[in-house]
Image: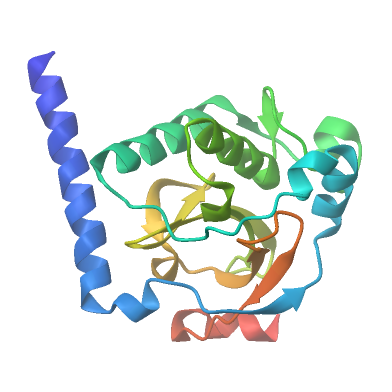
Amino acid sequence: MLKTRIGVFIVTLIALLFVGTAIAVDSTTAFMTTGRLTSQPIGHYQFCNEFPDECSIRSTATEPVLLDEAAWDTLQAVNNVVNNTILPATDHQIFGEEERWVYPLLWGDCEDYVLLKRRMLAEAGWPLSSLLITVVLQSNGEGHAVLTVRTDRGDLILDNLVSNIRIWNETDYFFVKRQSERDSGGWISIDDRRQIVAQHVGH
């Protein structure tokens, strides 16, 4: 048991050092550049109609969360438990509908994973202004949703398709838009100019 705990601690420490090193190289790219208010995804619009209290939260304190060891452990724990507990399925398979955002119980698609991770982190004390639903495009041009977690080490991505947590600019997604950190019902565009995602522009 002691060896196991030591091993987990070492892995966690290495991960923290990796995040810090990646940001130290060029801290300006570790944080997304956002733009103006933009359109709300239809799924989130319907979700807000069903859960209006969750989409009317205004935040005045929007500083990123301090990513210490405890915070990193919490992120990893929530990401792992949701990814390993919820089984992937489309809205058509579950509800017979094209698009529906819900808190999953057993089955869910990408938005559902994001919603559950966001709620679990909020219940653990994380501010909603640092837990932002984000729309991206995959390399094949298909839409996808991930959770952006705003920290002092950079914008981290929790993804149901990838087990490890990454800084946003280390993914091969094209970032389209995310929730506003000031308004849980508002959305803002993301200015993603990385060369690695140039291929997405034509989709």
**Residue at point 91%, 42% (across, down):** 97
Q: Nearest the camera: 54 or 76?
A: 54
Q: Is residue 105 left or right of residue 16?
A: right
Q: Quadrant of the C terminus?
A: bottom right
Q: Is residue 106 left or right of residue 16?
A: right
Q: Nearest the camera: 158 or 40?
A: 40
**Residue at point 53%, 58% (across, down):** 61
Q: Quadrant of the N terminus?
A: top left
Q: Nearest the camera: 17 or 3?
A: 17
Q: Quadrant of residue 19?
A: bottom left
- In this rendering, does residue 127 appear at all? yes
Total number of numbered discs in the rendering:
0
Percent position (x, y) of residue 196? 45, 80
Image: 112 above or below 4: below
Image: 7 above or below 53: above
Image: 23 above or below 12: below
Percent position (x, y) of residue 74? 37, 35
- In this rendering, does residue 100 appear at all? no
